[in-house]
Image (cartoon, coloured by chain):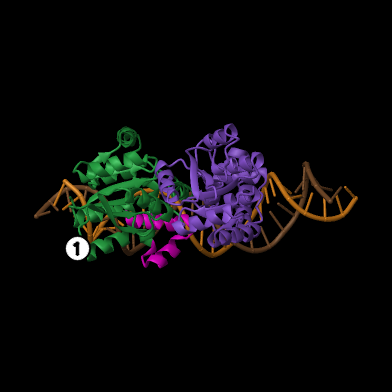
Chain colours: A green, B purple, C orange, D brown
Amino acid sequence: MKTPFSIIIADDHAMFLDGLTSILAEEKSINIILTAKTGTQVLKYIRINTDQKVDLVITDINMPEMDGVELNAVIKEEFPHIKTLVVSMLEDAKKIKTLTEANANGYISKNAEKTELLKAIKSILGGQNYFSPHIKQILMEAMFSAKSEPEISLSKRETEVLKLIAQEYTTQEIADQLFLSKHTIESYRKNLISKLGVRNLAGLTRYAVEKGMLK
Amino acid sequence: MKTPFSIIIADDHAMFLDGLTSILAEEKSINIILTAKTGTQVLKYIRINTDQKVDLVITDINMPEMDGVELNAVIKEEFPHIKTLVVSMLEDAKKIKTLTEANANGYISKNAEKTELLKAIKSILGGQNYFSPHIKQILMEAMFSAKSEPEISLSKRETEVLKLIAQEYTTQEIADQLFLSKHTIESYRKNLISKLGVRNLAGLTRYAVEKGMLK
DNA sequence: TTTGTTTTCACGGAAAACCGTGATAATTAG
DNA sequence: CTAATTATCACGGTTTTCCGTGAAAACAAA
């Protein structure tokens, strides 16, 4: 008799976690060794129990502290032999792309049926990656539509400053808060304005709000 | 031996549906007679199988076609004897309020543990409504915060000017566009700032965007 | 008809934003 | 190890916003 596969499940929604656990508990070949609500919990466990065999980590994308994308990246970095299956509510093309680039072994939506979930798990444990046809299609579409939006990328500092600007802080106040010269903040302002193709503070603020950068 | 309770579960995410089904399948006193992905499916079933006893409908809030709030309202209208338990991802105070007003028998978040879920179901089947302490708190907060926000009303002109401000036009430009003195627009600016309790252009813009005044 | 709201206009000064035109480290990517 | 990007700082000038303090006319509501 083969030893069962050891898997870890991470999802911040307890009910989903319980549900998934119930589903997989029925499978004799699967042994759930941990269920966690954050990526950090998972990492902590893996790092401590290095002697414990872990075959697969099933993780949600949206989690507090450390989300599924990050968790996947760290696992692939530190423990490349551990397989990962990412499960998500949304079908976010960008995140899927990031995940494929970070070598996640599979991605399915929470819209997937139980049978598809099991299919994905078995494929991955069998050594094959699994991305559902639906997901593949979204990826393809993203490839094309992505070209129409030249995707403006902001650096950490730029993002930080932009947030504060949109939160009604003045240049001087932001400078004080970040222990920088007001000239520096002014530079960021200018760069942001030209980078984002807006005219003034109103444009910057709209950008920040519409991209959901606040809160 | 008592006859088991008949319940229906509705959620557009198959995986969650399967999970919930697995959890409840363990309970002998519960008999799942239908799982559905939309509110309309549930309604259709209930309306046709009028001879079939239905004790409880567990429904997600966010569903296509007909969401949980609507489904709850219709059920309570047509079949007041059927209990309802609403499960949701978000803890949206407004929706919870609507639900209590529509006589939903319970509301829990997907963050809830399995034990809380079972507790809620048993309470409701036993004839008691169930709203978790956490949800109650959110409701209370909403009550207060709703009153503290005395709904700011803007006049036509104020709205018009605010829109233009948020669209990156300067005072002078707005004045030209509306054939008014720039002093007039400045007045509106000031009034808007104090009326909306913001500090500057960024605040005005955020207000406009968040209230969906643009486009 | 008096009271309140909305719309309109005015001035001056202080503060902040915007613009051009730089430059020097530090870090990161190829 | 270069090349590119990022992060930092500087200055002077112009434009715009912000603030206080008004006020008159039009209109709606009580």
Q: Label 1: which residue?
A: A50
Q: Is residue B33 above or below residue A154?
A: above
Q: In percent of the image, x 55 and y 53: which residue is there?
A: B107
Q: Per the image, is A156 magenta? A: yes
Q: Which of A176 and B7 is in front in this view?
A: B7
Subunit that carries the residue with mark 1:
A
Name the secondary structure under disc 1: loop
Q: Where is residue C29 in the image (x, y as percent from the top left)?
A: 20, 49
* Residue A191 visible to the viewer: no
Please give the range of residues in magenta. Answer: A155-182
Magenta stretch, main secondary structure, is helix
Q: Which of A146 and C5 is in front in this view?
A: A146
Q: Position of residue A167 (x, y in %)?
A: 48, 57
Q: Position of residue A162 (x, y in %)?
A: 41, 54
Q: In this view, does A154 lie to the left or right of C8?
A: left
Q: Is residue A63 left or right of residue B84?
A: left
Q: In this view, does D19 lie to the left or right of A180?
A: right
Number of callouts = 1
Q: In percent of the image, x 30 and y 37: which residue is there?
A: A132
Q: Residues within 10 Å of mark 1 (few under 14, many from 20)?
A: few
Residue type, label 1: Thr
